[in-house]
Image (cartoon, helix red, strand yellow):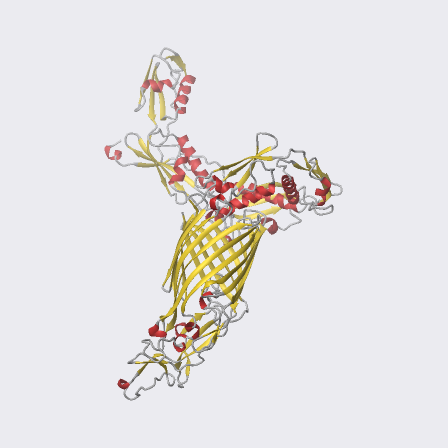
Amino acid sequence: MKSSNRQRPVVVALLATTMIAGMSAVPAMAQDAPPVAAPAPVPAATPAGTIRDISVTGQQRLEPDTVLSYTKLRIGQPFTQESLDQALRDLYETELFADVQIRNDNGALTVEVKENPVINRIVLEGNKRLKEDKIRPEIKLAPRQIYTRSKVRADVARIIELYRRQGRFAATVEPKMVQLDQNRVDIVFEISEGPKSKVRQINIIGNEKFKDGELRGQMVTKQSRWFRIFSSGTSYDPDRLAYDQQKLRQFYLTEGYADFRVISAVAELTPDKQDFIITYVVEEGQRYKFGNVKVNSDIRDLSGDSLTKMLPMKKGDWYNAKQVEDTVDTLSETAGLFGYAFADVQPDFQRDKDTLTMGIDFRIANAPRVYVERVDINGNTLTQDKVVRREFRLAEGDAFNSFLVKRSKDRINSLGFFQEKLDVEQKPGSAPDRIVLETNVQEKSTGELSLSAGFSSLERFIVSASITQRNFRGKGQELRTSVNYSAYSKSVEVGFTEPYFMDKNIALGGDIYRRDLNSFRYLNNNDRDTTYEQSTTGFQLRAGVPITEYMSLALRYTLNLDDVTLDKDTYYSDPDGAGPLGLQCDPLLAGRYLCDAIGKRTTSSLGYSLIYDTRDNRIRPTRGHNVVLSQDLAGLGGSVKYVRTRLNASKYWPLGSGFIFSISGEGGYIHSLEGDRRDASGALVDPIRLTDRFFLGEPQIRGFNIRGIGPRVKRWYLTQDSTGAYVRQSGNSNVSDDALGGRMYYMARAEVEIPLGSGAREMGLRPSVFLDAGAVAGLRNPQVTGHSPGVCANIATGQRTQAVSDGICPGNNATDPTQNTHTLIIGPFEEEYLGDTLKPRVSVGFGVNWNSPFGPFRIDIAKALLKEPGDDTKLITFNVGTQF
């Protein structure tokens, strides 16, 4: 080889390998690869003789003696044509040599070898769907190893298998060799990944009782269609093929076809090597009915006759294998209620093919009554044992009870400290009548850093942040702090809860908070000004005790200091207080509803909540119901007196296949204990102050804005049209909208959580569709200004006065404006009181919960179907947070 060629690497194709539908590829040397010499034939002139000498040539790394050690050729021994052929085969089988020849010169043998090259490096090209860290562990070749074709072939097969597991059956791998100096090579695996193989068609042959579409609906594998773009079930998976056969059998067995069987299931790759066509051949058989069904019990505490009467199936009903399985589980749980944890329930089938009936005898074998020997808790590295143990309804020495075991599992899940796949295993103890309850938990993040953002037509951009640790120090304590900020509202809150005070079943907690709200209205185009400012500083103390297993009582004491103020320069008729009336809120500027709200007050209230909760999980329930009755009495000191009552209820049903249906409703009423109240002019006003009323909107009812439902005063600013008449200006920027809340409210919700495929579940996606409804009302109508010519201010004193006519101030000189004594600060306007009705507002929509890498994320899209004049609607809301 010339020196110029030594420095230029030569790329050689090693194998042309194609993997189709799981069939093994046969690698072959590419056309441009250097040929491998066939074993040289031994010269016919010397068919036999004695070996006089043996020499080895061509080796680079191996010693001559090492090369000869792989053969049986030795000096002084006779040799034949066959022995030389065998020596060639022995050397090739070592896979150390690319070429071997044996030359014979009257008994002097020369073994000429060409060693296989040493691998310099392994290169992967074309892999995008599978990263190198997934492929390299499967490759057995490595740098500084001897290159062999069999090892390359095996590595190609391993890479192909990786892509098959990803559903890419059209993937191909072509290995190539880049020749280097010093008999070294780089091995390059050129990968063509191909598209993900989909299931183009599912054919079913032999079904007469059920249509193809109905049977396909029972399968996990789905036909690839455009509307299933986010479904993971359209990819071909051999394991899923076997699972679908079981699903078909389960379906037929629940419909009474006890002899059903799948004769064959074949998956064929389409000619374009892109998709699969799956064909099932089935035999349905005859449909059976239940025959005689009874229970025989060898346990003295369980009466077979009594249990027989409780069986869900009756003679003459269509046979249902799922019902039989559920009955076995129910009988086992029933035995567990009486302390027989290891009761063996076996159904004995009596099939009569003549009458097409299936008789069943449920046999409960005798078993000892079991007691709890020990409760073991494993996997909790942060959470203390006592936090889990105190949720157990069974203790060491208690008689076993399967219902209490399930209840214990539900209570542990409701803590929210562990992954949802928690289970309480029942293991034999040291004696036949002893059982060990082993709880294997897997802790999850209980700290939550939540960041939420939203857009409101009232408050524009809103940001809030909160940090919550629900398992503080591993003791189950909850510590939280939150900060909310927008241009018009701010709040800070810190809270702490001890669920088991001094290891007693008594919960204690408290909150300290400061909340500032700056309400506003629009003035001219998009300009805003603040209407009232509300500052609330207070704290709350809480205590809770259980009454029964499902009922508890919560007590609370709250003390709030409220201060509602208005800007004097803007809303007072005499900002300097120099006039005869002094400082006084002007209804023309602010409206009587705001003038009535200003002032400082103290609210000292004592309240309770009576809670009845049977949900299986308080964080993410799937069944059970929850009812809460709450009342708060304000008037234990302070300046505010009322009774506020609320009733909340919710119920959950699992619909099967992962669907969860829930309905919830709540309502409330607040009754004043102060009697009639009057404003500065002597007019009656609502006895419940603005800050104590109920408000509805986002997030209670989706599809509406924050405080977007219920009583409100809207002020429209007027402008002159072409005829000189005053009309309402168009656009939201020329309307001030102030929600007033109400004394009574109600709301209801129906929601269905929709399950997704396994891939979406792993991502934490939980979509739902919902319907929300509600209303808030019950205020005493405030006095509003039907039409006002506007408000003027004295240029010298700032004192406010009403315009003499629309937009015209008193004492002004029309011909010489420099002589004007007043200026117009608010143009002509009219007010209207809207929304005070209990007619339902209804919205429908869908939303998605997503446990994203950034934390829990929720987005809702809702459309208001029923609304009343004055209501503010909103289409999209979202919330995002993170956990630690």
Pick the front one: 16 or 481: 481
What number of labels is visible? 0
* Res. 629 in view: yes
Position of 179 with respect to 508 (left or right) is: left
* Res. 748 in view: no
Q: Position of residue 239 (x, y in %)?
A: 53, 40
The residue sitting at 31% across, 88% down in the picture is 814
Q: Position of residue 708 (x, y in %)?
A: 46, 67
Examine the rendered structure and indicate whether residue 247 appears above or below residue 808: above
Position of 757 with respect to 472 (left or right) is: right
Q: Residue furthest right?
A: 355
Pick the front one: 474 or 874: 474
Q: Residue furthest top?
A: 76
The residue sitting at 75% across, 41% down in the picture is 354
Pick the front one: 709 or 794: 794
Position of 493 with respect to 339 (left or right) is: left
Pick the front one: 471 or 525: 471
Examine the rendered structure and indicate whether residue 608 appears above or below residue 707: above
Q: Residue furthest front?
A: 637
Q: Residue furthest bottom?
A: 815
Position of 202 with respect to 274 (left or right) is: right
Q: Quadrant of the N terminus?
A: top left
Examine the rendered structure and indicate whether residue 393 appears above or below residue 574: above
